[in-house]
Structures are given as C-alpha cells and as structure tokens.
Image (cartoon, helix red, strand yellow):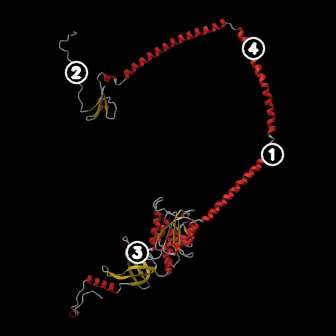
Amino acid sequence: MSDAPAIPPEAQGEGNAPAYSVSELAFALKRTLEQTYGFVRLRGEISKVTRHASGHIYLDLKDDKASISGIIWKGSVRGLMAQPEQGLEVIVTGKITTFPARSSYQIVIETLEPAGVGALLAQLERLKAKLSDEGLFDASRKRPLPAMPRVIGVVTSPTGAVIRDILHRIRDRWPVHLLVWPVVVQGEAAASQVAAAVQGFNALAPGGPVPRPDLIIVARGGGSTEDLWPFNDEALARVVAAGTIPLISAVGHETDTTLIDFVSDRRAPTPTAAAEMATPVLAELRAAVFDYARRMTRCAEAGLEHRRTRLSAASRGLPRPDALLGPAEQRFDRASARLGAALERNVAAHERDLARVAGRLTPQMLNRPERARRERLSELGRRMRAGIDRGMAREREQLGRIDQLLRSLNPDRPLELGFARVHRADGTLVRRAAGLKPGESVALHFHDAVRDARIEGERAATPPRIKPPTPGQGDLF
C-alpha cells in the first residue's frame, strides 16, 4: 500500500486536487514498489556491466522486449555463484526499488546464478581462455612432485569419506606426517576457504612449530557441475598458481574437470589416486634396495673373478722368479767372495805409500813451513787493521760533512734562534704575507710548541727596533 497522503473526498474536485511535490511523489512510488516487489526472481541476459571503484557492480538485465537496471552491492559480490559477464544468461533474486534522483526503477540483486549448465560451462570456457592466455596453464611452470615427502598437507572436508580414503591409502604405502586443513567443499564459502587453506600452507616457515608441507593435496568427492563449481573460482585458481609448494588436484571423479585441475602441478582422477601419486610404496622401495644390493654383490664378485682370471693368464706368460734372480745371485756371491781380499790389498798398498812419504820428513822440514805461515798471517793482520782504520776515518769524515749539511737544511733549526713558521689550517706552509686573508686561522710553530692565531689585518712594515745601549756602557767611538 502507498504511504502517499490521502486526498479528502471534498477536495477531489477538479479544481481542488492537492498538488504533490516531486519528492513526495518520487518517494511514495519508491515505497510502493519496495512493498509490492520486495522479493523478485528474474531471468535475463546481462549487458553493460560496470565495476565501480567502490566495489559495487552496475548492470542491465534484458530480454528481447525489455530491459531493467540492476545493482549488486559490494557486500554481496563475494557470495555470488558466478561473476557477472556481458552476454551471460542468469537468474537473479532481489527487490525492486527506485532511484528518486532520476525517477528510474532498478533491481537490487542479492543472488546471481547462471541460467542452466550451458551458461555455467560457457562462463568457464571464457575464464579458462583468459587464464591460459596469461600462461597459468603452461607446462613449464609445473613443479615436480617430491619423490619421498616427509610432510603432506591435505585440504578437504574433515567428515567425508575422502579424508578416510587418503589416510588409509597413505598409511599402507608410506610413513609420513599428515596435516589436514578442514574446509567446506561445497557452497558459497568453499572457494574462499580452500584458497585460504592453500595460502596458509604456503605461508608456513620451514623449521617452524608447524612443519611446512612438502606437498599439498586438494581433494573432494564427486558431484554435479553445480556442486563442483567452487573449484572453478578464478581467485582460487590464481592462489593455486601463485603457490610455491607442489599441489595435486583431486576434485571429483575421473570424468570431472575443474579449473583448479589446469593450474595445479598434477591432476589425480580420484582422491585415492592422489594419495598414490604423492607417496611411494615402502615395501617396493625395500625390495628395490635389496635387489640393488644383490645385483651390486654379483657385479663385484664377477669383477673380482674376471680380474683373477686375467691375472692368472698374465702370470703364465712371465718367467719363474728363480730364473730371473739366479744369475744376479751368482754374481753377488762371487763379488762378495772377492771383496775381503781386495780390501786387504788396498790397505797394504796405502800403508806402504804412507811409510815411504814419512821416511822423507825431518823435524826441521816440519818447523820451517809453520814459522813462515805464522809470519805471513801476522803481516796480513797488521795490514788489514791499518786498512780498516783508514776506511773508518774516511767514513767518519764523510758522515760529519753530511751531518753539517743536514743541520743547515733542517727547517726547525731557525726555530731555536727565536723564529717561527706560519702554517695554514690545512697544514700548508705560508711563504708570503700576501697569501693570507684577514680573519684566516693560522698555526705558529715555535721551537717548543705550536700556538693558534688569527690574521687581523695588514700592518705597514716597520724596521726592527734597536735596543738602546745600557747606561754606563762605553762608546766604541
């Protein structure tokens, strides 16, 4: 019912009808439409989609005969089953209201869903093409799965059969630490919760109190296209693509395909298959290790046997050791037998030579060379000491001349006579008074210390003052 002011019967004459103001009529119509059409379900095609900086979305819904404006407030955008796109046929619910400033009516949309599976798939194909053009599906960006993970993170519902299948399969295959991030896997909140879980696992720091997973599994059982639709969310796909931990997508059955399958590093047809992809079989690894050990032992034994055979064959071609060493041993025995007699003959010959030489020597012959050597050494000693003394005298004289020259060139010697050196603040020597400016700081270097000074100004040169003679002093003239 309208809240417009009632018109009294007596005032309903043609000349006495009350006059509404424009605002009264506009708001009366607004209240009437909102009360009459407080809940409306419309089906139509979207056109002219405008996303405002405030977060609101403005659009038009049309069919072949009419069109109506619509608005989606920022708070309702995140809960939509599908994002509005031009040309998409949708079913919306909301209420009819007016915009009094322009005297136009519109629908405030609260829910929006594609009109049928065909529209959903068409929207999905457009989104897939967009992400593919950005390179999010490229094989070059797919990360390899770890061969033997120590920690696996699972994003799924904590109450469904999926988590039980994954736990049972992993327990039978490989001992691993499993972290479960519980989420809802159906409905409006599913996409945001799964995205938050993937971001949370990637945000864990290595070595922290909660171990960082080596691998992530996003799992959900089968369902209809509408049930699996949260895994076609664009924001979720971008979160998965931006992650740094390898991720396996196990959503639905083998024939089901969602957008997350294309951006993940590996797609599994079922959650059980994802558990098999993520883990090796411990029993198979043990069997492989034992098989490698047996093969290594057999190879080592075969190698040793082969070398033993080659060594035996080579040894048969070599002569016997006694045949090689026999002649040398005989020569050694003969030489050793002759060695004693040869040494005795050699000693006897040296004794005869020594006796022959000793017989020619007399005491006088022994003493003369000794005295000559002593006299010669004494003469050489005297000459050496004389030469050393002369050399030292020359060096001492030369050193005295150098010392006199050094003292004459020493810049500090005039300071002992009462002079001072003038240096600028940077340490450079002042050679002329013209190079100094009034107010400039200088340093005066005296014989015993350094004093700071400041140039006050120029002063006319005056002859040095001569001290008058002391009274009582005689005159030379």
Please report whichever mark, 1 or 3, sits nearer to the chain's N-terminal start: 3
Q: Which residue is mark 2?
A: 465
Is 407 left or right of 441, judged from the image as shown? right
Above-or-below relation of 210 to 25: above
Q: Which residue is mark 1?
A: 316
Please report whichever mark, 2 or 4, sits nearer to the chain's N-terminal start: 4
Q: Nearer the viewer, residue 170 or 340?
A: 340
Is the residue under label 4 in contact with that under label 2 (CB below 8 Å)? no
**Between marks 3 and 2 in the image, the one whose residue lies nearer the viewer:** 3
Is the residue under label 3 in contact with that under label 1 (CB below 8 Å)? no
- Distance between mark 2 and mark 1 Cα atoms: 122 Å
The type of residue carrying mark 4 is Arg
- For the N terminus, the image quarter is bottom left
| Residue in the picture at 53% in, 62% down | 150
Helix, strand or loop at disc 4?
helix
- Distance between mark 2 and mark 4 Cα atoms: 106 Å
Which mark, by number, is residue 77? 3
Q: Residues within 10 Å of mark 1 (few under 14, many from 20)?
A: few
The type of residue carrying mark 1 is Arg
Helix, strand or loop at disc 2?
loop
Q: Residue 297: x and y, percent? A: 69, 56
Q: Residue 366: x and y, percent? A: 65, 8
- Distance between mark 3 and mark 2 Cα atoms: 104 Å
The type of residue carrying mark 2 is Arg
Q: Residue 470: x and y, percent? A: 19, 15
- Distance between mark 1 and mark 4 Cα atoms: 58 Å
| Residue in the picture at 57% in, 71% down | 273
Which mark, by number, is residue 352? 4
Above-or-below relation of 451 to 147: above
